[in-house]
Amino acid sequence: MQAEPSALFSGFRVLGLYSGHVPHALRYHQKHREFYVVTAVGRSFHTYNVRTVNVILPDDISCVAADRMLVFAAAGRDISAFARNKEVVMRYHGHRQEVRLLLPLGDQLISADAGGDVIVWDVQGGDEYLRLQFDSASFSVSAMMHPSTYLNKVLLGSSQGALQLWNIKTSKLVFTFPGWSAGVTSLQQSPAVDVVGVGTATGRIIIHNIRLDETLMSFTQDWGPISSLAFRTDGPPIVASGSPQGHIAFWDLERRQLVTQLRNAHSTAVAAATFVHREPLLVTNGADNAIKVWIFDQEGGGARLLRSRQGHSAPPTTIHHHGNDGKNILSAGQDGTLQSFSTVHERFNKNLGHGSINKKKEKKKKKGLSYEELRLPAITAFSSAAARQSDWDGIVACHRGRLATTTWNYQRCTMGAHHLQPPAARGNAIATAVDITSCGNFAVIGSSCGRVDVYNLQSGQHRGCYGNDEKAHSGAVRGVATETLNQMTFTAGSDWLLKFWRFKSRKQEDQLKLHAAPASLMLHRDSGMLALALDDFTLAVVDIETRRVVRKFAGHHGNVNDMTFSPDGRWLVTAAMDCTIRTWDLPSGSLVDCFLVAMAPVGVSLSPTGDFLATAHVDSLGVYLWTNKSLCGPVGLRPLPADHQPTEETLPGVTADESEQEVTSEEVDDAYRSAEQLGAELVTLSLLPESRWKSLLHLDVIKRRNKPVAPPAAPAAAPFFLPTLPGLTPRFAEPTPSEQETQVQLLLLLLLPRRAFISDIYILTRNIERPLRLLKDCGPSALSVELSGLTSEGGGASKPLLRLSSRLEAGWAELRASFDQSLCLLTYAKSALL
């Protein structure tokens, strides 16, 4: 059977992607007088400051560069130039291997690839101006820089350690620097002319005068190779160096010593660090999906974080919508952070940070612990409620390998003060499931040992547990849920049982035996439908009122990772390891939509308003949004057959390969084209505007109005020779007016000495029908002219106008009285206590 695209969802955009391992580019826009940061994320690059721009390329971007007008991005062996951050103005083809370095230089662009080719391009024409070929074994280009005031010169650094200064206009090698027996990783121009900074693979920083070939000073950092260099230009002689560990060191060039350092500026290697020109600001980015701006206003020359854009540095595992407006998505990632992404604008994003061990009795021990030892492991499950989030913590999270759960405060964007743990914990049990009541006062937490405990969120106190011998299930608890009125609690365990408990007395009322062990549980509180994902890849829907299985769904070929209900409880959307996202219709008990994705989805959440579906995927740092088509127009849903073959939908913000997007001429010729007329007895709709065909309804009136009142008169015979006026410049004489036209003009001048216009309405006042017909045919401007012509200057009289004014005022008074009566009645109906 032919594959069909999704009928319900279409890709919209991706949230939480900001930066990759590619160094950023900083450009200054002279017209806007602002700096813009360009970062690469996969196949797209983003421009930050005014707004985020997402431009798609056919391959992963390897490097970016920018000048005052254009942004250059290299993907594979091709280079593209973008104007206004979105319009491709030029493409440069000629490299035989992947492009690794880009350097804009005036009207030229210099690029270097992995094979040793360095090409100089004409930016405007796209032509190859110069090609230099190097042997990768002896001189592999690893860094490029244009020395300030050195006309048509470029300095090349190699991974073997040597440097070469080239004149790209004459294609001649000017000078060769032997190097310092270490590979060059970074080249940077200093504020002083002739002086450059060289970063090496051994962690050494060399300040070198290239004119005198003299080393002025050198520093050594203990964190490995130099990943980036940047000179401060606002006064203090400071050079910053980045490291693969994410630390940044700041060196004083006058005192020749280390001034300060930023530990853990990024959780991964610092891809690039750039000082903003003549400002105490440092812009950094890294592969941890973060862009940060640091300001130097601390005592002793230290820097603090001014602003940042950052997402998860490791793929998210669990996502849920927070609140009832559907504008915020909570996401927990493998990096241990809990973040909130806004679907409205990035400025509303929140980073709740990492979980940490903060017990008061261990404060003394903390002094000897490292930063990594204080961090809690990644969050495996969490629940949130917005009902009392302004009073106390409204988020409870379970962590990998830990029994104690943590509380979080959404409004303060921090981890809460409580660590919820059973009072008599024994063994190596861990927390596996959590749910917060609809009132926001209690949290119900299930663990791997079979316990289900209740905690008060305001005080963090333990309020009891379910079951005999403090065990609700004989196996691990896979899911917990509470209904809207806090009357019942539902728990599912690996013992194949779904149990129904009284929330207040914590006594079991009933249980339901399942045909397989449940993996997770999801309750739609408004409809009372409880969905369970089972280990045999099937789904079961239980009605909590009748406590019976009302629907069973089968079709997934892998573990069901997550599921979510539509706001009205009609649809159940599931995501599984078979890379499919399926939508099940509960009233009909059938599958109504299914589509494939390239990466297996691990989390899915449908907004409370039903407008967006959010998904998280394996090995992807972003949260992807899909538009619900049923809110934009009618969608014909029908049960899908058993042999339905879903089609693969491209993730939002990701484009297919160019080979997949090409359309051959045969495909264009074979495309279906509609006939001009489907049949003689059928009606074919016109594509013309309404004003063109609506007049056909009054065709008889139009013909009668356009009927000529007199037969056409023959035009006057034109003279054989056109009369001309005497003079050097030939000019045609104006036609002589006839005797009748002359008499009419004289009569008008005698009657209206001060006005040369008589209103047509005044002329036709003897017959009332003709003035009314004239008013209907006039436009607004012509009507204004006709009415102004009724004055005494136009031949009219003031007495008819006075009578007309009195008639209009009397009619308006009667109409105004009716309006006032209606408004009075309406005001009474709105304000009275009926």
Image: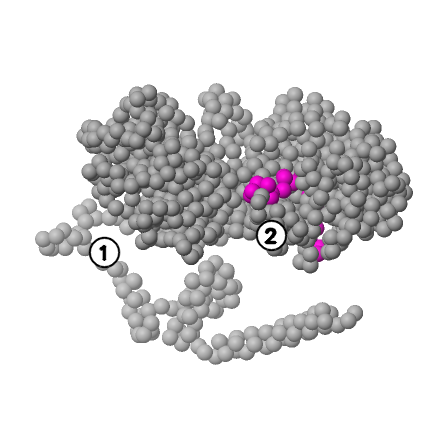
x, y (%) of residue 546? 87, 40
| Badge 2 amino acid | Cys
Q: Which amino acid does label 1 sit on?
A: Pro
In the displayed structure, does residue 508 sit left or right of residue 27?
Answer: right
Answer with mark 1 or mark 2, whichever residue precedes in sequence: 2
Q: Which residue is drawn at 75% across and 28% down?
A: 535
Label 2 Cα crowd, 10 Å radius (few <14 / some 14-19 / many 20+): some
Report if the CB atoms under discs 1 and 2 are less than 8 Å apart: no
Per the rendered image, the range of residues in magenta is 370-388
In the rendered image, residue 228 lying in the magenta stretch gets the answer no
Q: Which of 481 and 688 is in front in this view?
A: 481
Q: Give the residue drawn at x 23%, y 29%.
A: 176
Q: Name the residue under label 1.
A: 735
Q: Can residue 637 be seen in this view?
A: no
Which quadrant, please, contains the N terminus?
top right
Give the secondary structure at mark 2.
loop
Picture disc at residue 825: none
Q: Which of 461 and 789 is in front in this view?
A: 461
Is residue 385 shown in magenta? yes
Q: Residue 413 carries which label?
A: 2
Residue 739 in the image: state x and y as whole percent: 26, 62
The answer to which image quadrant residue 477 occupies is top right
Query: Where 237 sits versus 428, above or below?
Result: below
Q: In this view, does 683 lie above or below 358?
A: above
